[in-house]
Amino acid sequence: MARDLHRTGRPEPFGARLLAAMDARGPLCVGIDPHPSLLTGWGLPDDATGLAVFALTVVEALAGEVAVLKPQSAFFERHGSRGIAVLERVIADARAAGALVLVDAKRGDLGSTMQGYADTYLDQRSPLAADAMTVTPYLGFGSLQPVIETAAANGAGVFVVALTSNPEGRELQQAVCADGRTVGTTVLAEVARCNVGARPLGSVGAVVGATLTEPVADVASVNGPLLAPGIGTQGGRPADLPRIFGPAMRNVLPSVSRELLAAGPTLVGLRDAAARLNDACRRAAEPTR
């Protein structure tokens, strides 16, 4: 998919493109998570053929409707090379229809290996190039530099895992560092440092779960997009978001997958479910705008 270029010849930053997409289409991000149970629920076989029907139906239904589609790479990888071929087509078709694509890969490594992941998902010459990818910072935030630099050069985005929606994450993410900050708070501060001076929104985002029970301090200082997974099946609700994110609601990208995907396999069912959730997320953000 071609990139808008500034007068400098550089691609338009992801943060600006995302904000424009959210303004035009609403804040909802829809995960494409082809769980075996969802394939079965749609009457499809749990193989690469069923995967293709499932994923491409979601793209057909929603790529022209929502701001962001988020394929979870693991559910494509489990089908081998044929599954990766489906992922490649999902990315291309969704972007061609106007959606931004965030590959949920949660890669975390260092050096040349991390550069390889960046080249795969963010370098626009790659057949798997998307608009953004998720990464984990637990080999040290500096290990993410190849991804952050590759993203900037390609007008792409990075979402760094900070405070997640799963209860198992608390043991690590809420551990206290020597300076008194939690690990999660330290990650948010590093993300904020990447976005200093970015306008209208930085391109390095953070993953902050929609099921958190307490407000996230200083989250507005991130100055980047905030991916909020956990809406729906995991128990998060759009109405919970202002309590968690406060004045940062403008930058929140609520993410839903299984609850919405269960509304398939019809295009109408998927679109109606997405419209309802998108409207609920818009209403939740309204008092903070």
Image (cartoon, rainbow, N blue to C red):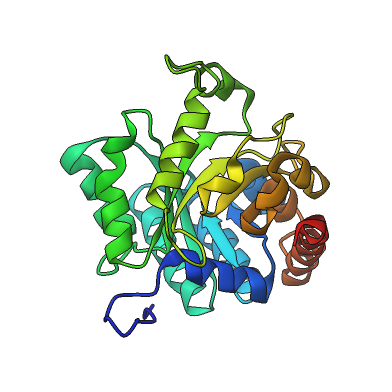
Q: Is residue 240 left or right of residue 20?
A: right
Looking at the rendered image, the quarter that the N terminus falls into is bottom left
Q: Is residue 53 left or right of residue 107?
A: right
Identified at 51% across, 54% down, the residue is: 224
Residue 246 in the image: state x and y as whole percent: 72, 46
Q: Is residue 35 visible?
A: no
Looking at the rendered image, the quarter that the C terminus falls into is bottom right
In the figure, residue 156 lies in which quadrant?
bottom left
Residue 32 in the image: state x and y as whole percent: 57, 54
Q: Is residue 67 above or below residue 111?
A: below
Q: Is residue 137 above or below residue 246?
A: above
Q: Is residue 112 visible?
A: yes
Q: Outermost residue toward the left?
A: 112
Seen from the viewer's position, the closer of residues 230 and 273 is 230
Seen from the viewer's position, the closer of residues 206 and 273 is 206
Residue 144 in the image: state x and y as whole percent: 30, 42
Residue 268 in the image: state x and y as whole percent: 77, 71
Q: Outermost residue toward the bottom?
A: 7
Q: Is residue 125 above or below residue 144?
A: below
Identified at 69% across, 53% down, the residue is: 249
Q: Is residue 208 above or below residue 82?
A: above
In the figure, residue 191 lies in which quadrant?
top left
Identified at 47% across, 78% down, the residue is: 96
The total of numbered circles placed on residues is 0
